[in-house]
Amino acid sequence: MNWWLILFTFIGVNLDFFFILLFLLKKYRLTSVIVGYMLGLWILLLLSFFAGQILDYFLPEWLLGILGVLPIYMALHDDDEEAKDYKTHRPAVTVLITYLSVCAGCNLSMFIPVLTTLSWMGMLSVLITLTILSIVIILIIKQLGNLSAVNTVMEKYGELLTKVVYIGVGIYVFFDSGLISHLLSIF
């Protein structure tokens, strides 16, 4: 398990949502935002893990390297995601729905190739680690949300940084899966 790749992927797929968290934290209580975000994160990570396990069972690892195309496609596909304002009486549900609507495609396309070969214990470690990291990040965003410089940087460079991360993860999946070495051995 490559922890750097998992952390890099997590930050990359959530970078634009961190900006949305700035607004959600101003609108709702901290605990509601944490609960909604955690539920969304766990749902998408578990879906990615189970989809990856199914693919890993039926396909050789090197062939799974083709999944590296997904994050690269997400980087090059210029379909900006916007958070919608869902009307509900429960703020945690609003945060959950917002997270799933904004991040589902990116999280699944990025984490399926990354989590494909993990064991159950490895996945549990990832869930625990990313849960703790998420709570820390939300607390930091809560504090940084009052700084105008943070908002300016996110608006100016957030999308570019996200695309760079996506392409980097896709290329890593090509090499880590053995796809590139398998293709080179054919030629």
Image (cartoon, rainbow, N blue to C red):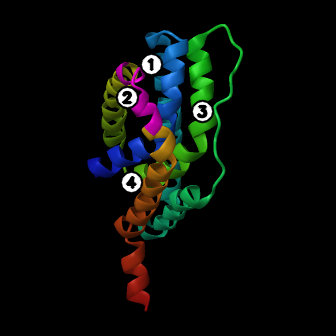
Instruction: Give the mark, 2 or 3, whose residue is nearer the N terminus.
Output: 3
Quadrant location of residue 140? top left
Q: Position of residue 19 (x, y in %)?
A: 49, 32
Q: Main secondary structure of the magenta part?
A: helix
- The residue closer to the viewer here, 119 or 159, is 159
> For numbered disc 3, what is the local secondary structure?
helix
> For numbered disc 1, what is the local secondary structure?
helix
Q: Residue at x 53, y 40 (%)?
A: 47
Compute the Cα span from label 4 to label 3.
24 Å
Q: Residue at x 39, y 42 (%)?
A: 11
Quick check: marks 2 and 3 in contact, CB under 8 Å? no
Q: Does any portion of residue 1 appear in the rendered image?
A: no
Q: Does any portion of residue 121 appear in the rendered image?
A: yes
For residue 117, the mark is 4
Quadrant location of residue 181? bottom left
- Extent of the magenta region: 143-152
Circle 3 is placed at which residue position?
100
> For numbered disc 4, what is the local secondary structure?
loop
Compute the Cα span from label 4 to label 2.
23 Å
Please name the amino acid that badge 4 sits on: Thr
Residue sitting at the far right: 87
Instruction: Give the mark, 3 or 1, whose residue is nearer the N terminus.
Output: 1
Quick check: marks 2 and 1 in contact, CB under 8 Å? yes
Q: Residue at x 42, y 73 (%)?
A: 179
Please name the amino acid that badge 2 sits on: Ser
Please name the amino acid that badge 3 sits on: Leu
Circle 2 is placed at which residue position?
134
Which of discs 1 and 4 lies nearer the camera? The answer is 1
Question: From what the image shows, is residue 40 above or below residue 89?
Answer: below
Q: Position of residue 102 (x, y in %)?
A: 61, 36
